[in-house]
Image: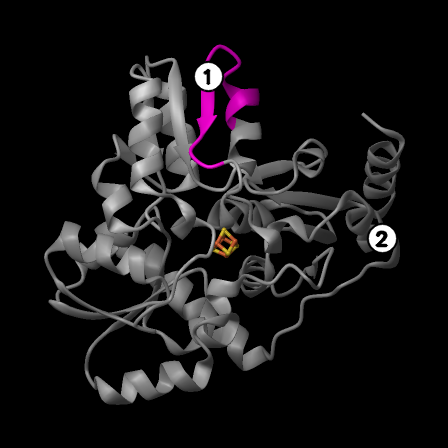
Amino acid sequence: MNALQQEILELKEKKRAIILSHNYQRPEIQDIADFIGDSIELCRKAQRTDAKIIVFCGVDFMAQSALILNPNKKVLMPSLGARCPMAQMLPLDYFKLWKQRYPGIPSVLYVNTLGEAKAECDVCCTSANAVELVLRLKEDTILFGPDRHLSDYVAKKTKKQIIPVPPQGFCPVHVLFNVGDLKGLKKIHKDAILIVHPECTMDVIEIADYVGSTSQMCRFVRESQEKKFIVATEIGLIHRLKKENPDKEFIPAYKEAICTAMRANTLKDVYLSLKEERYKVILPEEVIKAAQKSLEKMVEIFR
Ligand code: SF4
């Protein structure tokens, strides 16, 4: 542990704060976090803590979700640069326009959306539960956003008519994986299992041995008897996978699969965030209330 990490931990104790880190954060941030997980796991953790301050090391929509579920806590984002480009692809006005175009069609939004859009949809979903959630809805036509590739995956698995909103939303990291490269890696590592995220393009998903969210990938690897995995998601996850499974080998599907938004948070930002209690996540009360309903509906559907 370096001196800055030590200082952060001391400050955290003094301020009665908790540090939550997404699976894609820099390894040196993951190493000082109280909890590492995907966006929803982190929000649930935030709900259970009695800490006064939550330093949320992830991107904007995740920190907003933490606030939506914990409106009485102080949620801080270490860097204002941590803005997910995919979440920005669905501005509120545009989403409203599509809802008007398809009246009566239920809208499901992936949690990777900003608070205002969440507040406007019927129900939220995660990459882990999107397929099951859409299957449980009685309607056969669904407005789904903002990730086009997750929409395609859901359409394929559920056989329902999924209308993607926006038509071409995407995660700039998960579209980087290429079938040719992956087939090449599979040839070199014949004994490796290819695990991919559902934000990848359909041609990549089709050659995968396992498709799942980051938390599902972690569980799959932990429970698997296999020893070698090619990992098609942001490379930050490999740090966690290696720590949890020291006897297994992980090959990044593409070494440059780095989310610059996630990497905007540095250790120094985490330190300053705690010290100066910056940058406080703020949302209008009515947005918080409406977005809570969309998130609660998701939980209800699985009860
Ligand atoms: S990995 Fe993709 S979806 Fe996740 S924060 Fe980065 S850009 Fe957004």
Left or right, 156 with respect to 125, comes to left
| Residue 181 position (above or below residue 154) | above
Residue mark closest to the camera, 1 vs 2: 1
Q: Which circle's residue, 1 or 2, is located before the other in the chain?
A: 1
Q: Nearer the viewer, residue 133 or 161?
A: 161
Q: Residue 252 in magenta?
A: yes
The spot of residue 243 in percent (x, y) is 57, 21
Foreground of the two, 18 or 92? 92
Marks 1/2 in contact by CB < 8 Å: the verdict is no
The residue singled out by tag 1 in the image is 249
Horizontal and vertical percent position of residue 99: 29, 83
| Element class at badge 2 | helix
Circle 2 is placed at which residue position? Answer: 272
Residue at (65% x, 48% y) in the render = 263
The amino acid type, in three-letter code, at marker 2 is Leu
Q: Which class describes the residues within 10 Å of circle 1: few (<14), some (14-19), or many (20+)?
A: some
In this figure, which colouring scheme has been used for the structure? one colour
In this picture, which residue range is highlighted in magenta? 241-254
Identified at 61% across, 65% down, the residue is 71
Identify the residue at horizontal 49%, vertical 17% (top origin).
Answer: 245
Label annotation for residue 60: none
Q: Amino acid at mark 1?
A: Glu
